[in-house]
Amino acid sequence: MLGRRYEIRVVGSIGPAAREAFTDLVVEVEPTSTVLCGDLDQAALHALLDRVRALGLELMDIRQAPDQPSS
């Protein structure tokens, strides 16, 4: 199964050490939250959520990003 693009938002701005756990994703640090973006299949999504939990990060939101139109 092909992956879908997901955006996972956690509370707070995560530091460099926590960002190391997400090198396979785009990490956008905002003032009050951090957004993790990437193409994930279901197994990878669950593994990512396990990493979020293991780091003690508070999950705010999970969104499946809209499909990008083909060019």
Image (tube, rainbow, N blue to C red):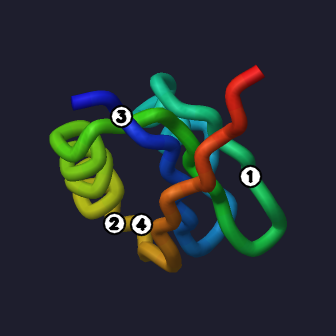
- In the image, is residue 6 above or below residue 23? below
CB atoms at circles 2 and 1 under 8 Å apart? no
Mark 4 sits on what residue? 57
What amino acid is found at the position of numbered circle 2 in the picture? Gly
CB atoms at circles 2 and 4 under 8 Å apart? yes
Tell me how far mark 2 sits from mark 3, CA to CA.
Answer: 25 Å
What amino acid is found at the position of numbered circle 1 in the picture? Val
- In the image, is residue 58 above or below residue 25? below
Mark 1 sits on what residue? 29
CB atoms at circles 1 and 3 under 8 Å apart? no
Place residue 59 in its image quadrant. Answer: bottom left
Tell me how far mark 4 sits from mark 3, CA to CA.
Answer: 24 Å
Mark 3 sits on what residue? 3
Tell me how far mark 2 sits from mark 4, CA to CA.
Answer: 4 Å
Place residue 14 in its image quadrant. Answer: bottom right
The residue at 69%/27% (across/down) is 70
Tell me how far mark 2 sits from mark 1, CA to CA.
Answer: 17 Å
Give the x, y percent position of residue 28. Answer: 73, 46
Category of crowding for the residue at label 1, using alpha-carbon neighbours closer than 10 angstroms: few (below 14), some (14–19), many (at least 20): some
Badge 2 or badge 3: first in the primary sequence: 3
Mark 2 sits on what residue? 56
Residue 20 shown left or right of residue 47 in the figure: right
Q: Is mark 4 on a helix, strand or loop?
A: loop
What amino acid is found at the position of numbered circle 3 in the picture? Gly
Tell me how far mark 1 sits from mark 4, CA to CA.
Answer: 14 Å
Of residues 38 and 55, which is closer to you in this image? 38
What amino acid is found at the position of numbered circle 4 in the picture? Leu
- In the image, is residue 30 above or below residue 44? below
Badge 4 or badge 3: first in the primary sequence: 3
